[in-house]
Amino acid sequence: MSGTILCGYDIETASDSTMGFMRGAAALHAELEIPWTVYLTGKTVEARGEEIRELIDDPLLTVGQHTYNHMLLKSIYMKPGDGKPVHGACPNFFNKGGTPSELREEIGKTQDLIRDILGVECHGLTGPWGYYRGLVDRPDVLQILAENDIRWIRTNARDYRDCQPTPFTEQPFFYADQGFPDILELGVQGYQDDFYWDRFDDRRYGDSYNDYLDAMLEEVSEQDLVWNLCSHDHRSATVEAFQAGKGKWLRDFLTKAADSGCRFIAPTTLYEEMKKTS
């Protein structure tokens, strides 16, 4: 038993943080020899494509998309039940998803941008914000993904309250029951980033995000689970800012996970492994 970890980062700000985060992450993953995946919004590719191309040949890097303008694939209704504000609203928060026609435009346009500007054929997507149970109830959206040759996705990324953490019992699966046996749901287990931990965690494992990560690492290792770890290009305007912020907890966690014997793989590798046994 060892556990499997995928590292995926939502690159969505189309700002200085785009390259501060990506350059910092590229250096960290090269040093530790760990694969990593970025999920790019189309707007980010338009704004920072020439700079992103500097990193495209990294053999550890896989590229996925994140819609053009960070449009939700389906609506979410966050109902945490603790009376505390969430995203500025209290006690609950609703965010509307895109229509099928809007999503077809968002996803198709981003596929074209990644192909034309970065020279990459994109087969992966992460759904902005993430959703309870992923897309099991949205075959219309799965059809749009299939039309755009999307094969692996991260959309199962919230609990029954549309909040977090996502239980680690939510493991990768193919959407065979919905008629799309070639689309693999990877999920995002746990929290989508440190800021969601800060809002929702009960601190039962300790007072820092790394305390939580360490506790989940033990569970993943003991039960040989898949963990799709997530972070975002927020507050990382320079490599130094990345190293002092997100890069610090990432380095601590990735080093400990490697020492524990967990394996790190790319989404494409997990897809191929699971397809053989599906």
Image (cartoon, rainbow, N blue to C red):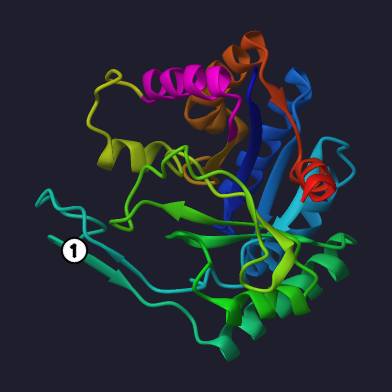
Q: Nearer the viewer, residue 14 or 150?
A: 150
Residue 57 in the figure: left or right of residue 256: right
Amino acid carrying label 1: it is: Asn
Q: Is residue 174 on the magenta stretch?
A: no
Numbered disc 1: secondary structure: loop
Q: Which residue is at the far left?
A: 83
Q: Main secondary structure of the magenta part?
A: helix
Residue 8 in the figure: left or right of residue 165: right
x and y, in percent, of residue 65 in the image:
68, 61
x and y, in percent, of residue 86 in the image:
22, 55
Q: Nearer the viewer, residue 4 or 210?
A: 4
Q: Which of 78 and 180 is in front in this view?
A: 180
Which residue position holds label 1? 92
Start-end of magenta stretch = 209-226
- Indicate whether 267 appears above or below 213: below
Q: Which residue is at the far top?
A: 259
